[in-house]
Amino acid sequence: MSRIGKNPIALPAGVTLAVDGTTVKVKGPKGELALDVPKTISVSQDDSTLTVVRSDETKATRSLHGTIRARIANMVTGVSTGFERNLDIIGVGYSAELSGKKLVMKLGFSHPCEFTPPAGIEIEVPAPTRIVIKGIDKQQVGQIAADVRAHRPPEPYKGKGIRYHDEYVRRKAGKLAVSSGG
């Protein structure tokens, strides 16, 4: 049995779960999320505990067991506390600011880069070199952070660009001047 899939999921106070056929809906103080579960996997609820069970031992079902459990656990966490990703902007003259809901970044190009977040995603700029992306869907928050980072990924020589707050960028040595022995 899957080590992740067999772990029960605890529902915090204020979070409700509804299983309607193959759709699992989780509702909490921050919002509501839904997930379509394959027919070979069932979700059962006992008071404030959730269990994910697979119906057969085929390879496809075994591989989905832990994944579905992890996605439901992320949904529960998202609607109760939410997720956030922090990005740092490194570089002289590089900065970001909010213009309404639109993120405007100056990243060394001849024009400012603009990014409009989709519904359900909140972007904050607490400092000109720090971007905070918040939301209830873990996958969507991570994808938006990757899309913002893709405007100017960190380069290995000076480390300039947009990086995740906990990301380490390996630095390369630049060209060395070679003196002629003549």
Image (tube, helix red, strand yellow):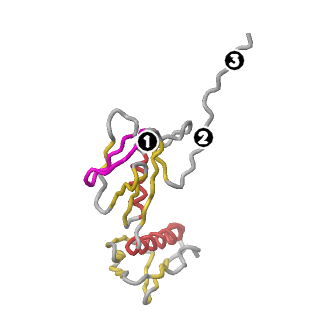
Whether residue 33 is in magenta: the answer is no
Q: Quadrant of the N terminus?
A: bottom right
Query: Quick check: 10 left or right of 98?
Result: right
Q: Which residue is mark 2?
A: 171
* Residue 175, x across and y down, in percent: 61, 27
Q: Amino acid at mark 3?
A: Ser
Q: Please, which residue is most extreme toward the right here?
A: 181
Number of other residues with Cα within 10 Å of mark 2, as a class: few under 14, some 14 to 19, many 20 or more: few
Q: Amino acid at mark 1?
A: Arg
Q: Residue at x 44, y 89 (%)?
A: 46
- Which one is nearer the viewer's eye here, 5 or 63? 5
Camera-nearest label, 3 or 1: 3
Element type where label 1 sits in the image: loop
Q: Which residue is mark 1?
A: 152
Dot 2 or dot 3, earlier in sequence: 2
Q: Please, which residue is most extreme toward the left here?
A: 100
Number of other residues with Cα within 10 Å of mark 1, as a class: few under 14, some 14 to 19, many 20 or more: some
Proximity of marks 1 and 2: CB atoms separated by less than 8 Å: no
Q: Residue at x 52, y 39 (%)?
A: 155
Element type where label 3 sits in the image: loop
Dot 3 or dot 1, earlier in sequence: 1
Q: Amino acid at mark 2?
A: Arg
* Residue 23, x across and y down, in percent: 35, 74
Proximity of marks 2 and 3: CB atoms separated by less than 8 Å: no
Mark-to-mark CA distance, 2 and 3: 24 Å
Q: Which mark is residue 179?
A: 3
Q: Residue at x 53, y 41 (%)?
A: 159
- Main SS of the magenta part reads strand
Task: Give the magenta part as a residue range.
Answer: 93-106
